[in-house]
Amino acid sequence: IYTEISIGFSRIEDLEHTVTEGGFITLPIPKEALFLTGKIFLQYRKREGTKRSPLPDFFIGAHAAVEDLPLLTRDEGRYRTYFPNVTLLGP
């Protein structure tokens, strides 16, 4: 998510200020989430996928799944398909 937000900023210091002032925290991605990302990516490729590397949503969903974190998203489809146990919050 940090990467996706970063495109709106020209300097990391400005992004960090916004994240801190907004009360958000950043968490390292656990190895378990990285492992799960690979497994989900294989499911995606077997089902329909044409991408050759894991999609960012897979990293985000796996991190939420492993850490048991709710996920705020406008695009629930892929998360519901590949991460059915993650609590999704809509805007």
Image (cartoon, grey):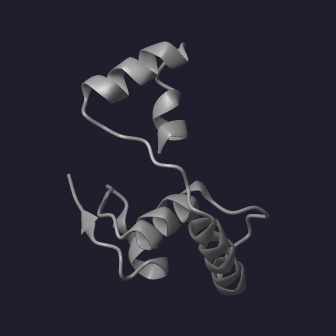
Q: Residue at x 46, y 48 (%)?
A: 27
The answer to whether 36 is drawn above or below residue 75 in the figure is below
Quarter-of-image position of residue 87: bottom left
Q: Position of residue 63 (x, y in %)?
A: 49, 63
Q: Residue at x 49, y 58 (%)?
A: 60
Residue sitting at the far right: 52
Q: Position of residue 5 (x, y in %)?
A: 45, 34
Q: Residue at x 43, y 72 (%)?
A: 65
The answer to whether 1 is drawn above or below residue 35 in the figure is above
Q: Please tell me how many numbered marks the rendered image carries.
A: 0
Quarter-of-image position of residue 31: bottom right
Q: With 19 as the anchor, is 54 left or right in this view?
A: right
Residue sitting at the far left: 91
Q: Position of residue 89 (x, y in %)?
A: 23, 62
The answer to whether 51 is drawn above or below residue 41 in the figure is above
Q: Position of residue 39 (x, y in %)?
A: 66, 80
